[in-house]
Amino acid sequence: MQKVLSRVDLNLVTALDALLHEVSVTAAARRVGLSAPAMSHALSRLRRQLGDPLLVRAGRAMVLTPRAEALRSRVRDLHQAARDVLAQPGPFHPERLARTFVVQASDSVIAVLGRELDRVLAPAPGLTLRFRPNLPEDPLELREGRSDLAIGIYGDLPPELRTRSLYTDRFVSVVRRDHPMVGDRLTLDQFLSLPQVQVAPRGRPGGIVDATLAQQGRTRHVSRAVPFFLSALLLVSESDAVVTLPERVARTMEERLRLKVLAPPLHLPPYTLSLVWHPRLDGDPAHRWLREAVVQAARAAAPGTHPGARTRLGKIEGRQRGGARRRTDGP
């Protein structure tokens, strides 16, 4: 096969397409910008390659052989396909997009960005986003093409992956609004006395709260560990438990679930939510458009935020600057 391919000059496809279309050496040469002798030489090579005269004289004109007639439409399609492959991509039109993208993200990200993401993606009704929960294997999923984007808190990533910061957030502690033991301030002893709900989206125990408590020689008892942020908030809204999780997802459900959002009695630094993808998709117009849409949605859902930015609980934020980039399984 390699020897056969080495004898094939793909430039001859252009000459053959012109000859079969024009049925004239002179007109074919003019069509592709060659001299008549150069096109005549190409015809000679094609005759040897295909074992057929292709064009034969009939009086003062030329006619196609049966083999040439049979090749005509196939060569036209082949030539057009080659042109399409090598051509510069045209303008991207979201309204023509019919494609599914797999996105690794937690339910908290979907809750915070969902409404704005729907708005900025409205010009592409044929686009489908298939969300999957974050996994420890997110980088491998991106590298091997099983997912197209990942949104989350990441520390060390493989060096070839691309990242872009979306917004900063901070951790808050949440209880139900009519909690009998919690007022407008939560002390550490009070915090540790309450039943604890932990969100572990990647399925592993522990997290930033436990690590911070361990530095102080303290521990907590986690009575419920769940994989989803909204499930944790629902549990807290119907019990005397407390959960510590990102402020933005707490605010999305604060009124609907009648929650009380408080500053945690621990030094929990803010973190940056990042968009991650593999560089093989850098030049893909649809993927590039989707990335920009996610960034726009994040700016709209979290206006004015960047690593180190203040949030609604800004009085404590000053003591918690220096945004964390550690990867955690959950609070």
Image (cartoon, rainbow, N blue to C red):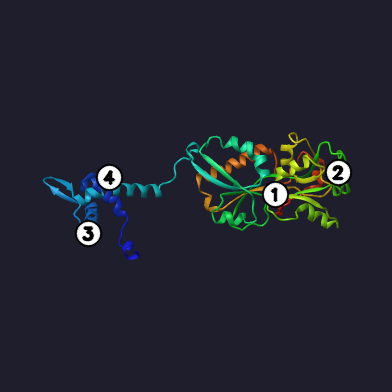
* Image side of residue 45 versus residue 161, left or right: left
Q: Which amino acid is tagged 1?
A: Pro
Residue assigned mark 2 = 186
Q: Which amino acid is tagged 3?
A: Arg
Q: Are marks 3 and 2 in contact (CB under 8 Å)?
A: no
> Where 224 sits versus 5, above or below?
above
Give whichever of discs 3 and 1 has the lower sequence position.
3
Residue assigned mark 3 = 48
Cα separation, mark 3 vs mark 1, equals 69 Å
Q: Which amino acid is tagged 2?
A: Leu
Give whichever of discs 4 and 3 has the lower sequence position.
4
Q: Looking at the image, which residue is at 40% across and 49% down?
A: 85
Disc 4 is placed on an element classified as helix
Disc 3 is placed on an element classified as helix
* Image side of residue 277 versus residue 214, left or right: left
Give whichever of discs 1 and 4 has the lower sequence position.
4
Disc 2 is placed on an element classified as loop
Question: 10 Å neighbourhood of mark 1: few (<14), some, or many (≥20)?
Answer: some
State the mark number for residue 227.
1
Q: Looking at the image, which residue is at 65% across and 56% down?
A: 136
Residue assigned mark 4 = 31
Cα separation, mark 1 vs mark 4, equals 65 Å
Question: 10 Å neighbourhood of mark 3: few (<14), some, or many (≥20)?
Answer: few
Cα separation, mark 3 vs mark 2, equals 89 Å
